[in-house]
Image (cartoon, rainbow, N blue to C red):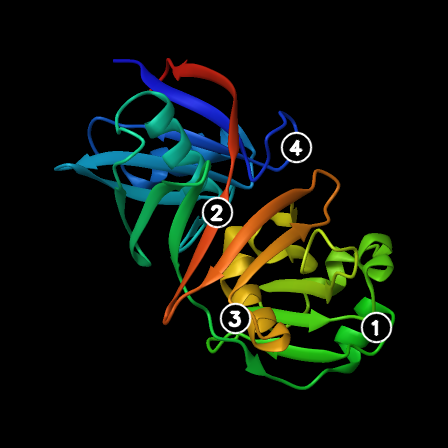
Amino acid sequence: MKIPLFQVDSFTVKPFKGNPAGVCLLEQPRDEVWMQAVANEMRLSETAFLCPKGNDYNLRWFTPSTEVDLCGHATLASAHILFELGFYDPDETIFFHTKSGVITACFDHGTIELDMPLIQPVPAESSPLLEEILGQVPLAVAHSADKTILLAEVADQAAIEAFDPDFRKIANLEETDLIITTQSHGGKFDFVSRFFSPHTGIPEDPVTGLGHCILTPYWAAKLNKDKLVAYQASARGGTVWCRLGKDRVFLGGKAVTVFSGEILHQ
């Protein structure tokens, strides 16, 4: 039996931009060793594995080196493939069962909107290591409650774009992931960011849904608005439409299928 496999660029309308993700459509569950081997073969930041669960899907995400509990761009890629192949009509909602609970995906004004867990930012103190990494004292610092994500607000967008990360030093931080962010004053976007996760084998994540689960409540509070447009200023770049709910974050984006194929050896 051949297993369908796709590569999708998420949070973009242009091929070879945004964040690429693998999407593997399974008819039956496969073990973690096999899924990890496929993800390592793909060498993308994440590969998603979908398996039917009644009318819904079980969804798991693997980096080239480990399974992760939450991934936004590979969820967007998964929903894109299911809608594109006609598994669901545009007016239907997809329910994904994941390690982070149920995530839904639906069409909203031409984008696919994901209902994601809200990660509340907790104010934190800067550190000499963080300031050495940034080359400046951040304007503000926050982290997730479980201290896996560190968020640092810096002075301006030029500092974001010019930032030259030292991945060895970032890997020495207590937190797994580092986000640098700033308010955008260009008019099109509310804020910009970059995301680094060398701990999980992803030196820089081009456009991350996970990061915007904490960035959305952070900037919603700062800017006093619950609908925001974000730009992740990686080399590939990507746009995320963000909406703050009561205890959820709604992330909207577009996606493009770059190639499709089949896994021949199982």
Q: CA distance from mark 3 to mark 4?
A: 26 Å
| Residue 80 sits above or below residue 124 on the image | above
Q: Amino acid at mark 2?
A: Gly
Q: Amino acid at mark 1?
A: Glu
In this rendering, the label closer to the viewer, 4 or 2: 2
Picture residue at 68% right of the left edge, 86% below the top: 125
Residue sitting nearer the eye, 203 or 151: 151
Considering only order in the chain, which callout, 3 or 2, is on the residue closer to the N terminus?
Answer: 3
Where is mark 3, residue-wise? 217
Picture residue at 66% right of the left edge, 56% below the top: 196
Q: Which mark is residue 252?
A: 2
Element type where label 1 sits in the image: helix
Picture residue at 25% right of the left edge, 37% below the top: 92
Q: CA distance from mark 2 to mark 1?
A: 34 Å
| Residue 151 sits above or below residue 122 on the image | above
Q: Residue 211: tell me if it is visible.
A: yes
Considering only order in the chain, which callout, 1 or 2, is on the residue closer to the N terminus?
Answer: 1
Considering only order in the chain, which callout, 1 or 3, is on the residue closer to the N terminus?
Answer: 1
Left or right relative to 221: residue 57: left
Residue 147 location in percent, x, y?
52, 75
Q: CA distance from mark 2 to mark 3?
A: 15 Å
| Residue 8 sits above or below residue 45 on the image | above
Where is mark 1, residue-wise? 132
In this rendering, the label closer to the viewer, 4 or 1: 4
Within 10 angstroms of label 3, few (less than 14), some, or many (20 or more) residues? many
In this rendering, the label closer to the viewer, 3 or 4: 3
Q: CA distance from mark 4 to mark 1?
A: 30 Å
Considering only order in the chain, which callout, 4 or 3, is on the residue closer to the N terminus?
Answer: 4
Where is mark 4, residue-wise? 17
